[in-house]
Amino acid sequence: MKELFKKTQQLLNKYSDGRTVLVFFIITQIVYFIMLFYTIPSVTKYIEGMKLLDMQPAGYSADYVKILFETLGNEGRKAYLFKQIPMDMIYPLLFAVTYSLLLTYLFKRIFTPESKLRYLNLIPVFGGLFDYLENTGIIIMLSVYPQFSASLAKLTAFFSVTKSIFTSLFFLILIAGTVKLIFKTIAKRQKAKYL
């Protein structure tokens, strides 16, 4: 495990240049916008104002899942399983890679190589991992419907909440890191001015 962790950090450091980060960021945004403007609306049109499971950061109850799947109907469940989920199986990997590279790129500029804070660049990886676990739960529930497991629904809700926690953590770290970089850059320029 330690060796995997070390190799991951080496790869992130190697490929976290501005160009690579930008290319991954653009690809990630394209996939995100396809979901936002095509695949998600293709499912939500069946659910009369309800929200999809993966769009509920605070989680959901087993009863909610049951009502959602009933409301979706056969066509809606197919759209969820065969339109939205395939795109959402691409996005977590892109999220994990893109935003880990972005944090690595940022951290190179604000922390020393010895700083343990640089390991926060792996937060998006955990977000992506829990997104996959959430998707797996949704796939199983959709595939076995009308059979329903309240335990699986609760477990999937846990994965949804955990994914949201790691995603929120990433954005907080990104904002804090960007602010730190701005102040560091200003301080550097002020220092250079008086030399």
Image (cartoon, rainbow, N blue to C red):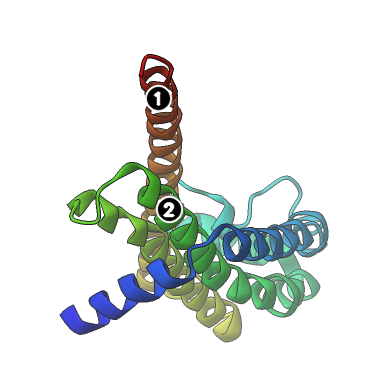
Residue receiving disc 2 = 103
Between 192 and 3, the one nearer to me in the picture: 192
Residue 53 percent across, percent down from the top left:
56, 58
Contact (CB < 8 A) between labels 1 and 2? no
Q: Percent position (x, y) of residue 126? A: 36, 64
Residue at figure coordinates x 53%, y 49% from the top left? 56
User: Residue at the spot x=76%, y=69% of the render?
Assistant: 76
Can I make out residue 73 in this image? yes
> Residue 124: x, y in percent?
42, 59
Residue type pointed to by label 1: Phe
Mark 2 is on which residue type?
A: Leu
Write down the quadrant of residue 184 in the picture: top left
For residue 183, the mark is 1
Q: In the image, is residue 163 above or below residue 128?
A: above
Q: Is residue 107 above or below residue 184?
A: below
| Crowding near the residue tagged with mark 1, few <14, some 14–19, many ≥20 C-alpha atoms within 10 Å | few
Give the farthest residue toward the top.
194
Residue shown at the point (67%, 48%) measured from the top left:
50
Left or right: 33 as drawn, with respect to 93: right
Q: Which mark is residue 34?
A: none
- In primary-sequence order, the first of circles 1 and 2 is 2
Q: Secondary structure at mark 1?
A: helix
